[in-house]
């Protein structure tokens, strides 16, 4: 067996397909490059939830769900505020009811945005901002964080990010969600399991360390030397490599496009973008030379880091923003699995000692 279960098929899904050889992601019949151009996050939720929940009036219902979920913010105790944002957000999310229906699903979609932005404000002594049900999920999330109305470009950038990460086959967090759903536990239980899997640096915890890497490299001229020494120390270069993609992660390009738009509007310091591009080029060159047997390319997390930084999210909250988008996929997968009705219960091979048989 392979301990990472690579090549093992563990579910049939109508939700998304990750084509690792050709670098293509399809969500319910639509390829990612089309999806990001023509759809908002609410449209993608509509797509993902179709057949699993009633999708009529979904955008307005999601706005109302943000307002409902905000009621829990009042119960935030100081011990949660000092935790890393993803742990504080997970603790608040655990208080939501463990239902299976659309209302429970939409509260869970709303929760990462509402709780993360509230916790970020509480951390710096500011009052959390009540959601505005009339806004889009992306616009309201940015407003709840900063307290001011975001620009159209900022909204479009966050919306593109949420669309890009909404679903991605049977990744580690989605698998965790499906395992829990297969026991017929509720959606909150599935989302909690998924969130716990997401936070690790090998999965959704990578974009914060991508910025640490840029800071440590310092200048484009220093990029190669810094990366060489990191590799020599046995470190992994954050934002590169993927279990399934053997070519460039298509999500990296979807986000690079959004980063360039932000840069052209002055929202990203040109020196920061130049440094990122130099680090990316040096890393790709180095990985090709040092790991010739393993195609390692840029993954989604590299440009995520620049995009979320430009939108004003602190790096310790990047995993929470990933969850704001991926939660839609988790819930659709959990529902698909629960409707299948079959408990997921694989086998293990025992390699420990066996009892001695008396002579
Ligand atoms: N930097 C340096 N070397 C790497 C990297 C990397 N980013 N990724 C893989 N490798 C190397 C490994 O060291 C290994 O080399 P070896 O055979 O000489 O020991 C070889 O490539 C194969 O690595 P595996 O561990 O088998 O690759 P796996 O499929 O498990 O890795 C993973 C996928 C975990 C994403 C890996 O590429 C990695 O750690 N990347 C950095 C963290 C990251 O960016 N995570 C976000 C992923 S995207 C997402 O989950 C949303």
Image: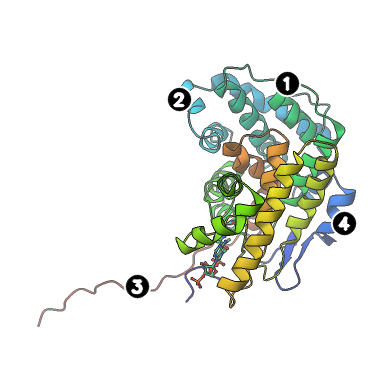
Q: Is mark 2 within 8 Å of ligand 1?
A: no
Whether tag 2 and tag 4 are in contact, CB under 8 A, the answer is: no
Q: Secondary structure at mark 3?
A: loop
Residue 198, position in %: x, y?
57, 49
Q: Which residue is mark 3?
A: 350
- State the separation of the CA atoms marked 3 and 1: 55 Å
**Viewer-proximal residue, 158 or 16?**
158
Q: Nearer the viewer, mark 3 or mark 4?
A: 4
Which comes sooner in the sequence, label 2 or label 4?
Answer: 4
Q: Secondary structure at mark 4?
A: helix
Q: Nearer the viewer, mark 2 or mark 3?
A: 2
Q: Are there few (<14), some (14-19), or many (20+) residues within 10 Å of tag 2? A: few
Residue 55, position in %: x, y?
82, 43
- State the separation of the CA atoms marked 2 and 4: 43 Å
Q: Are there few (<14), some (14-19), or many (20+) residues within 10 Å of tag 1? A: some
Q: Which residue is mark 4?
A: 34
Q: Nearer the viewer, mark 3 or mark 1?
A: 1
Please tell me the numbered disc located at residue 79.
Answer: 2
Q: Secondary structure at mark 2?
A: helix
Q: Which residue is mark 1?
A: 147
Q: Is residue 326 visible?
A: no
């Amino acid at each position: 067996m392979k301990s990472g279960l690579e090549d093992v098929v563990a579910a049939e899904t109508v939700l998304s397909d990750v084509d690792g050889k050709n670098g293509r992601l399809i969500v319910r019949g639509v390829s990612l490059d089309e999806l990001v151009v023509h759809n908002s996050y609410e449209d993608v939720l509509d797509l993902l939830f179709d057949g699993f929940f009633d999708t009529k009036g979904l955008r307005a219902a999601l706005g109302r769900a943000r307002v409902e979920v905000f009621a829990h913010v009042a119960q935030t105790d100081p011990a949660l505020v000092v935790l890393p944002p993803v742990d504080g957000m997970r603790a608040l999310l655990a208080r939501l009811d463990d239902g299976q229906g659309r209302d429970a699903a939409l509260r869970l979609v709303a929760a990462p945005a509402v709780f993360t932005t509230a916790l970020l404000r509480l951390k710096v002594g500011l009052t959390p901002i009540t959601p505005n049900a009339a806004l889009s999920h992306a616009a309201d999330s940015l407003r709840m964080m900063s307290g001011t109305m975001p620009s159209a470009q900022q909204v479009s950038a966050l919306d593109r990010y949420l669309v890009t990460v909404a679903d991605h086959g049977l990744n580690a967090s989605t698998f965790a969600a499906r395992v829990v759903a297969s026991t017929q536990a509720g959606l909150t239980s599935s989302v909690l399991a998924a969130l716990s899997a997401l936070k690790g640096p090998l999965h959704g915890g990578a974009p914060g360390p991508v910025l640490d890497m840029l800071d440590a490299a310092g200048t484009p001229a220093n990029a190669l030397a810094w990366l060489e020494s990191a590799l020599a120390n046995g470190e992994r270069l954050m934002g590169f490599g993927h279990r399934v993609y053997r070519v460039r992660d298509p999500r990296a390009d979807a986000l690079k496009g959004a980063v360039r738009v932000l840069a052209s509007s002055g929202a990203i310091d040109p020196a920061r973008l130049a440094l990122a591009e130099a680090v990316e080029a040096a890393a790709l060159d180095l990985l090709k030379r040092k790991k010739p047997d393993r195609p390692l390319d840029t993954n989604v997390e590299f440009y995520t880091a620049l995009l979320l930084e430009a939108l004003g999210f602190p790096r310790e909250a990047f995993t929470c923003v990933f969850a704001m988008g991926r939660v839609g996929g988790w819930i659709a997968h959990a529902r698909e699995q629960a409707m299948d009705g079959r408990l997921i219960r694989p086998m293990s091979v025992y390699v420990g000692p066996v009892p001695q048989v008396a002579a």
